[in-house]
Image (spheres, helix red, strand yellow):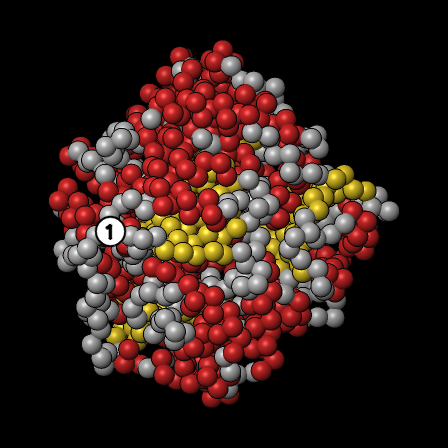
Amino acid sequence: MKALIATLFTVVLALPAWAEVEIQDVTSPKGIKAWLVEEHSIPFTALELRFRGGTSLDAPGKRGAINLMTGLIEEGAGDLDARAYARKLESLAASFGYDVGDDTLSISARFLTENRDEVIDLLRTTLLEPRFDQDAVDRVRAQVISSLKSNAKDPNSIASKSVREMIYGDHPYATDGQGTIESVSALTRDDIVDAHAGILVRDQLYVGAVGDITAEELGALLDELLADLPETGRAIPSKADLNLTGGVTVVDFDTPQSQVLFSQGGIDRDDEDFFAAYVMNHILGGGSFESRLMEEVRVKRGLTYGVYSYLLPKDLASLYMGSVASGNDRVAEAIEVIQEEWAKVASDGVTAEELKDAQTYLTGAYPLRFDGNGQIAGIMVGMQMQDLPIDYIATRNDKVNAVTLEDIKRVAGELLSPDQLHFTVVGKPVGLETTN
Amino acid sequence: MARRRAFALAAALLSAAVAPVWAQQEHEEVTTFTLDNGMEVVVVEDHRAPVLQHMVWYRAGSADEPKGSSGVAHFLEHLLFKATDTLESGELSATVAANGGRDNAFTSYDYTAYYQRVAADRLELMMRMEADRMRNIRLTEKDIETERDVILEERNQRTENNPRALFGEQMSAVQYHNHRYGVPVIGWRHEMETLDMEDALSFYQTYYSPNNAILVVSGDVDPDEVKRLAEEYYGVIPATVDLPERLRTQEPPQTAARRLTFKDARVAQPYVQRSYLAPERDPGEQEKAAALFLFAELLGGGTTSYLNEKLQFDTQTAVYTGAFYGGLSLDDTTFDLLIVPSEGVSLQEAEDAMDVAVAEFIAKGVDEADLDRIKMQLRASQIYARDNVDGIANRYGRALTSGLTIEDVQAWPDVLQAVTGEQIIAAAKEVLQPETSVTGWLMRDTQEVTQ
C-alpha cells in the first residue's frame, strides 16, 4: 500500500491548481470594488459583503452594541416592521445571513436570478434604513442575554473568557463581543443607531460575488446597494499588547469532563514564515487524525475524543491555540502529553515524511474548499481583506510546497514556546492547580 | 472545529428542522442502479469542480443493536478505521489524507455511513479501501480498549458535559416504551463500558454486507465509470444470505401522557420541550409526513411562524419557540415543540401559553398565503440545492437507509407541493394526542417549580 501511495504523490502535485476559479476584478461606476466569479449553470448568486472592524469597534462603555445591532438589521427596515419584513424576505425566497466577530461584520446574501432586482431593493433598504424599533431592540436584547446566560454555564465559553482576559489586558479582544448582561441591558436605541453608522461604511467594505451575474450587472447592483453608505466610520483600534505566560489556570466548574484551551503567541498572516508555521501546525496538531497530538493523545492513549491546535492570526494580534477535552481524572495526563509533543517539535522539528505527507494533503485538499458559490464568495472576500493578490489561488500550493524541513525546524524553534504555553482548564481536574 | 467520527444526533431538536428538499428531477443529474449482489448505487453528477464524494451507507444503526450492547454500532464505526488484511491501523485515513482528501463517518439510529471527499481521479483508490473494510477488519484487544476510552470521552463531551443532551436522552427514553429509539445512539455509559471484541464483530458480521449497503457517489464523476469500478470492487463481494430483516420491537398503543423534570446546576436557560409520537415517511405513502413537515414549518419554523408571532411578537412570553418534525426514520418518529420562556415567565406559564397557541392554530386553520409562501421557498430551495451535490447525495443515503426508495426521494418535492391546508390540520389533530406525549422541563436544580 505504501508503494502505491508514493506513486500517487506525483499525480496529485501535477494537478492544475484550480485553474477553474477565474476571478474578475470589478469596479462599479461609482467606484465600489469587488471580486467576481461568473457561474451561470445555476440561476442564483451568492454575494458576500464584509466590513472590517467587527465588535472591536464598540464605543467605550457600549460593549455588545455592534453585536446587538447585527442581530437587529433583519428586524425591520423602511416602511416594513419586523413581521412585514420577514414576510417580504420569505416571499422572495432569498436569504440574508449576518455574522459579526472581533474583526469583521459579514453579510451573506443568496438570491435567485428571476427576482434579483427586488431582492437587492430590499437589501438596500435593510442596510440603509434599518428601523431598530424599540420593541425589536428589547426582543433581540432578551435573546442575547439568554445566550450570555448559557455561555456562563458552558465550559467552552468559560475557558474562552478566561483566556481572553488573561492575554489581552485592556484591548477590546479581552472581552466578549456580545457584551455582558449589564452592558447589554444598558444599551439604548441611540447606541444601536451609532453602532450602525460607525461600522457599515464604504472604506471598510470588501465584496465577493459568485453566480449567475455578469460583471456589468454586478457593477450596477453594487452602486444601487452600497454607494449611499457613509464613506467612513470608527477608527480601527491599535494592535493588542499580549500578556503571555506559561502555566495552568484552573476554573472550577462541576462537570465530568474538563475542557482545556491552550495558548501561546502566534504568527501574523503576512509574516514571511507563515506558510512554514502553517505546515508545521498541520503536522503538530492541525491535521486532524494524522497529527502528532491526535496520535499521541487519542489514538495511542484514548485520553480524548479530539485534540487540535490552530494558528489564530487576527487583525490586531496573533495567537497559537489548541483545545482538548478529557475526563477530570485523565486530563492531567493529556496535558502532559501535549507539553511533551510541543517541546519535541520545538527542539527537533518534523520528519521528511511528515513534511511530504502534510504538503500532499494541504495542496490536495485546497480545491475541496471551493465547493459552492457561497464558499467561493467568502474565500474571495477573505483574500481581499488579507491583501492577497487576485492570482493567489493559483500560487498558494506553490507556497506550501516551497516549505523545507529546515524552514520548519527554524520556525518551530522560534514560534513554539513550551515555557509560554498556557493551559486553561475548566472542570474539576484531578492533580492540577492554578500556577502563578 | 472538525469533529472526527461524529455521529448524527438524530434526536437533537435544533438540527431536526433541516428540510429534506432538493432539486427537481429534470435538473438533478441522478443515476441509480443495483449491482448483482444487491448493493444499490446512487450517482449525483456535478462537473463544476474536479472533486467527488464517495460514501457507503449501511442499513444498520443503533436501533439495530442487540439488547445490552447499546453504542456498539457507533463503536464499530470507530473500529473500522483500524487495520484490515491489507491496511494498517489508521492507514485508510492516512492514505486519504496523503491524496489530499478528507474522510469521516457517522452513526445514527437507522444507519452508519463512511465517506471521503477527494480529487475526482481518486475514486478507484477510495473504492478499493472502502470495499476492503466492508469484510476484512482485523482488530486487536488494544484497539478495543483504547477506542472504548475514546467513545467514553466522546460521550463525556457530547452528553455528560451538556445538560441539554442529558435531558434529551431522558425525553427519548420516556417517549419510547418498547422501541430502540429510546436508547441513545452513543449508548448508555454502563453498557458502553462493557463493549468488547465479540460485540463489535458480531454486529459487523451481521450487518456489513453489499446487500445491506448503498454506495453514493457525488461530484465530477461519470456514472458508467462509477458502475465499472463499483462492479470491480464491490460487485465481487458475496451477498450475506442470512441478512436479518430489520424488525424492531414496535411501540404498543401509548395511552398515558408523561411528564418529567430534569434538574442540573449547569442549566442556564430553563425550557419546556414536548414530544409526540408521530408517523414517519413511508415508501409510497409520504402524504401525512409531508403534511406534518409543513405543519412544523407553519407552527414553529421561522420568523413568521405562528408560535413566533404569538409568543414572541404579540406577547413577550418566550425568547425562542420552535416546532420540529424529523420524517426520515425507519420507524415511528416524533413531532416536537420547544419554548424557552422570557425572563420572569415560569415554565408552567410558558407551557400553558404554548398549548393555547397550538390549539388556536388548529382551530383557525391554515392561512393559505402562509402556506403558499412556504411552498414557494421549498421550490426555490431546489435551485439552491444544486449548488451542493454532496447534500443531495446525503439525502439519498439517509432516505434509502430509512426504508424509502429512490422513487420516494424523487417524489417528495411534489408530495410537499400537493399538501392542502385541510390535510395539515387533519394530520396535526391526529398526531397531537396528549396520550402519546412527553412533556419535559429542563430546570436549574436550585429552581423552584413556581418561579
Where residue A289 sits: x, y (%)? Answer: 37, 33
Up-down: is B378 above or below A249? below
Q: Which of A227 and B164 lies nearest the eye of the viewer?
A: A227
Q: Which of A62 and B35 lies nearest the eye of the viewer?
A: B35
Q: Is residue B450 visible?
A: no
- Chain letter of mark 1 equals B
Q: Residue at x 47, y 56 (%)?
A: B31
Q: Locate the N terminus of chain A and report the quarter of the image it occupies.
A: top left
Tell which residue pokes out farthest to the right in this image.
A29
Q: Residue at x 72, y 57 (%)?
A: A127
Q: Is residue A276 visible?
A: yes
Q: Residue at x 31, y 53 (%)?
A: B36
Which residue is label 1 attached to?
A: B239
Please identify the quarter of the rendering in which residue B401 is found: bottom left
Q: Which of B399 and A218 lies nearest the eye of the viewer?
A: B399
Image check: A123 left or right of B270? Answer: right
- Dot 1 amino acid type: Ala
Q: Residue at x 50, y 46 (%)?
A: B222
Where residue B1 sits: x, y (%)? Answer: 44, 41
Image check: A279 left or right of B73? Answer: right
The local secondary structure at tag 1 comes to loop
Where residue A368 sits: x, y (%)? Answer: 53, 39
Q: Which of A231 and B331 lies nearest the eye of the viewer?
A: B331
Q: Residues within 10 Å of mark 1 (few under 14, many from 20)?
A: some
Up-down: is B153 above or below B362? above
Please identify the quarter of the rendering in which residue B183 is found: bottom left
Please identify the quarter of the rendering in which residue B180 is found: bottom left
Q: Locate the C terminus of chain A and report the quarter of the image it occupies.
A: top left
Where residue A175 sits: x, y (%)? Answer: 53, 41
